[in-house]
Image (spheres, rainbow, N blue to C red):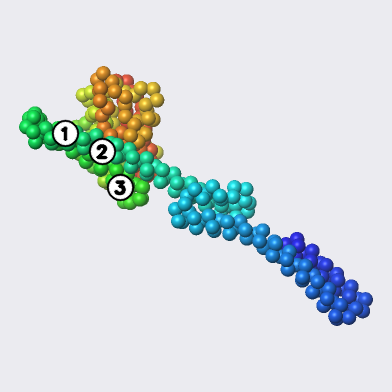
Amino acid sequence: MLLAVGLGTVAGVTLHWTLTNGQGLWSTVCVLASLVGLAWPLAWIATFRIAKPVWELARVAGELRDGRLQSRQEIPENATGEVGEVAGALRGMADRVASQLADQRALMAAVSHELRSPLARVRVLVELSREGGASDAIYDDLQSEVDGMDALVGDLLAAARIDFEALSPVPLSAREVAMRALQIAGLPADVLEVDDPTTKVVADATLLARALSGLLDNAVRYGSDEVRMRVSSAEEVVRFEVLDDGDGFAPGEEEQVFQPFWRRPPTAGNPVPQGTGLGLALVRQIAESHGGTAGAVNRDGGAVVWLQLPMA
């Protein structure tokens, strides 16, 4: 713009001088042609400087489209103006895609590892049964291994629904969803406490029931004898709490239990880590996908794991 203003000023002054001093038309044309000849390469240089960052962004975007995510390192970081905003958005998108792919690879590796152990045990049980050296409880053991693999696959499918945003949130009765979770977990209805039976929550019915049953399964696994579920509402949110009378959480475990594939270290009472490590991680993922949250705290004589969602 400064170049154009400067050349325009020079052209105007020159034209005024030639006409004022009686110079001929030919002299005026020569002066203007010289100015145009000077402006032409300068305009190309200015255009190239302006368009080069855009060309670079287009090239990097094409490489990202073809799957070469390492090309995001070539996105300029010091660009300003509109080009800088586009570069920042493109870099953020590429970083997010790379992070998601890394998480998926880690998840697949962890799942492969988790499935190998029960499959190996099933293979051993089948061989023992075939050779006639199995005990009478072999079918119960097989059923237990199959149930474990089925639970793991179910958790992965639920997580996939969240990743693909295949949710169907609708107003649901908090009490009815809690009752369904108790049925899935095989617990009696009298363990449920509801402050207001008319309370409704906005959520995907299948995913919410799975999250609540995951809380109950966790309480049954690590609790002792008493498991209770409490549903309360306040300040436009609905809170589902599951209380147990187990040993509670060690310092720092309140957040670790929500990490994928994290399991408690072996103890004297539980020498073999239980579960797949996906239950509570999936609970928090379901809660956050609905605009809520989940957490865990110790209490006198046990622990409380809770899930909180917006009220309908």
Residue 40 visible in the snapshot: yes
Earlier in the chain: of badge 2 and badge 3, it is: 2
Q: Which three-letter amino acid code belongs to the residue tagged 3? A: Asp
Do labels 2 and 1 touch, CB within 8 Å? no
- Spatial distance from mark 2 to mark 3, Cα to Cα? 28 Å
Relative to 184, is 241 on the left or the right? right
Q: Is residue 116 above or below residue 78?
A: above
The crowd level at tag 1 (other Cα within 10 Å; few <14, some 14-19, many 20+) is: few
Disc number lying in front (2 or 1): 1
Q: Which residue is mark 3?
A: 204
Quadrant occupied by the N terminus: bottom right
Total marks in image = 3
- The answer to whether one can see residue 306 in this image is no
Q: Which mark is residue 115?
A: 2
Residue at which label 1 appears: 124
How far, Cα to Cα, is label 1 from label 3? 40 Å
Amino acid on which disc 2 is placed: Leu
Q: In this orientation, which residue lies closer to the viewer: 39 or 242?
A: 39
**What secondary structure is found at the residue carrying circle 1?**
helix
How many C-alpha atoms fall within 10 Å of the one at disc 3: few (<14), some, or many (≥20)?
Answer: some
Q: x, y percentage for residue 56? A: 58, 56
